[in-house]
Image (cartoon, rainbow, N blue to C red):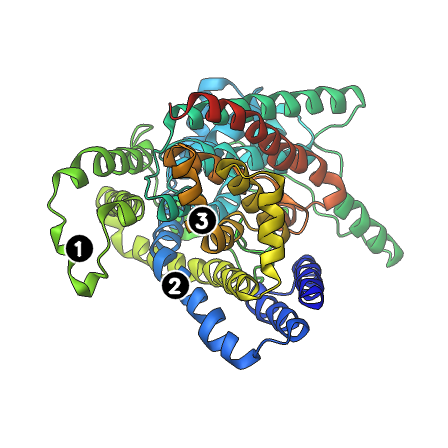
Amino acid sequence: MTLGLVGIIVSLILLITLAYRGVTIVLAAPLCALVALLFSGAPVLANYTEVFMPALANFIGQYFPMFLTGAIFGRLMTMAGYARDIAQTITRWLGPKRAILATVLTTALLTYGGISVFVVVFVMFPLARELFRQADIPRRLIPGAIALGALTFTMTAIPGSPQVQNIIPGQAFQTNTFAAPGLGILGGTLIFVLGMLWLEHRRRRLARRGERFSDPTAIERREGAVASVGGTSTVSTTTSTPASGTSTREQPTTTGSEDDPTSEPTAPADAEDSGERTLVPPNRVVPFIPVLLVFLVNFGCTVWLFPAMDWSHLQEEQFGGITLDDRQGIWAVLCALLTAILSILLMNAPRLRTLLRGLADGAKNAMMPIFNTASEVGYGAVVASLAAFVIIRDGIFAVSDNALIASAMSTSVIAGVTGSASGGMTIALNALGEELQALASDQGISMEVMHRITAMASGGLDSLPHNGAVITLIIVCGMTHREAYKDIGVISLVIPVTVTIALIPLALAVGTF
């Protein structure tokens, strides 16, 4: 048993190391599972085909539609120019000097509106760069501003979010994406306010030190030093224009996701191309329609349409005897994203042929993130099947036998180890979900509260430096961990963890609200 526990720990350390060094999780996860199996003496081939692969396939079977439609929606929003136009409209409302707030709100709106977190960074960076240039705010704050809008309150806290991190708890607790709305709004508001206070504090501090937007980044300084040795200068400068929002500075070509540690380098499908430049929104209202549709259709299906329909056919053997509660969250978000995608195609009917290219691009963008996350889930299933995992499970419940605390702790710790909110949450709930649900029922804890706190707990320790979204965000912004991670860490790790811990006593005392 002790040797098996050592194997689990070694495999976890190896997983973190490989992810941080850029090894794709599709390869790293089964390799690390093999290490854990060898230490425990468990059969390797049987565990791979009968434990690892079924868990991987089950995750893809359940959540591939979310990854697919989210990626397609994000691609079409960019090609149609809607994402850019939303940013320009919000900036006009707030004023160019409030570049940080405009960036956070635009990113949050796009994320809450259905664009996947692994797509929004490519949409937002060119826009944020231009906003920060106009306001002369140091570029090192761009990653933190995007992280606050994409990787925190809109991902896990705000009710109705179509992100997969808000859907997964519904599968375990038979809840929907609007679970515990009051608790989610309170938590989301606290994270937003604290995040903005931190970013404004950092802006003022950097301004007092004389740092400006035009100051070169560490990578630019390094490139300049290398170029000077050769007698030439290759450092590119940012020469964006307010009209286009484009730049002569080369863009990194790594795609990734919150759930995509070590995505493989590919050219971002959301980079500016002829389709994006030619599809111009007719006015400043139209770009908001698809985003609004995501919320309205999701809410309408959850609250009115689905409950009013007859779902007796779900009890048939071919559907596995499921209930509406088992699938309502996925179905509502899927219908919402499909409606939003259809609205973009209809509103751009004259350019339909150009837009249809976005369907294929979006489909390709969805592949690597979901396979990486699914591989992590397969790894977790193997670890959970080992006898030594009982020690870990008992250790979690030894800290507290309260279902809410145990759920938050197990989800947060595993998300931190894997560097993935959805992967960590899936692993934790697959291993402990039934036990947590039964314990919560015995203790009188609402399943909606379990949903909301578990979702929020997943979005904290997952943002350690080896997290895929963190790595991708820093690379896309052309910076280093040393420059940007301090702000990202405070915003997407310290603040969410602090808020979640603070909300647990309130949730236990008040219940669902």
What numbered label is drawn on residue 210?
none
Residue that badge 3 annotates: 435
Q: Amino acid at mark 1?
A: Leu
Residue that badge 1 annotates: 314
In percent of the image, x 37 and y 58: which residue is there? Answer: 64
Q: Secondary structure at mark 1?
A: helix
In percent of the image, x 35 and y 38: which residue is there? Answer: 177
Q: Nearer the viewer, mark 3 or mark 2?
A: 3
What is the CA distance from the residue labelled 3 to the residue labelled 2? 20 Å
What is the CA distance from the residue labelled 1 to the residue labelled 3? 25 Å
Q: Quadrant of residue 447?
A: top left
Up-down: is 223 above or below 303?
below
Judge from the rendering whether residue 47 lies leftward or rightward of residue 472; answer left or right.
left
Residue density around tag 3, few if under 14, some if 14–19, many if 20 or more, within 10 Å: some
Q: Earlier in the sequence, mark 3 or mark 2?
A: 2
Q: Earlier in the sequence, mark 1 or mark 2?
A: 2
What percent of the width, then of the height, locates residue 488?
Answer: 65, 37
Q: Quadrant of the N terminus?
A: bottom right
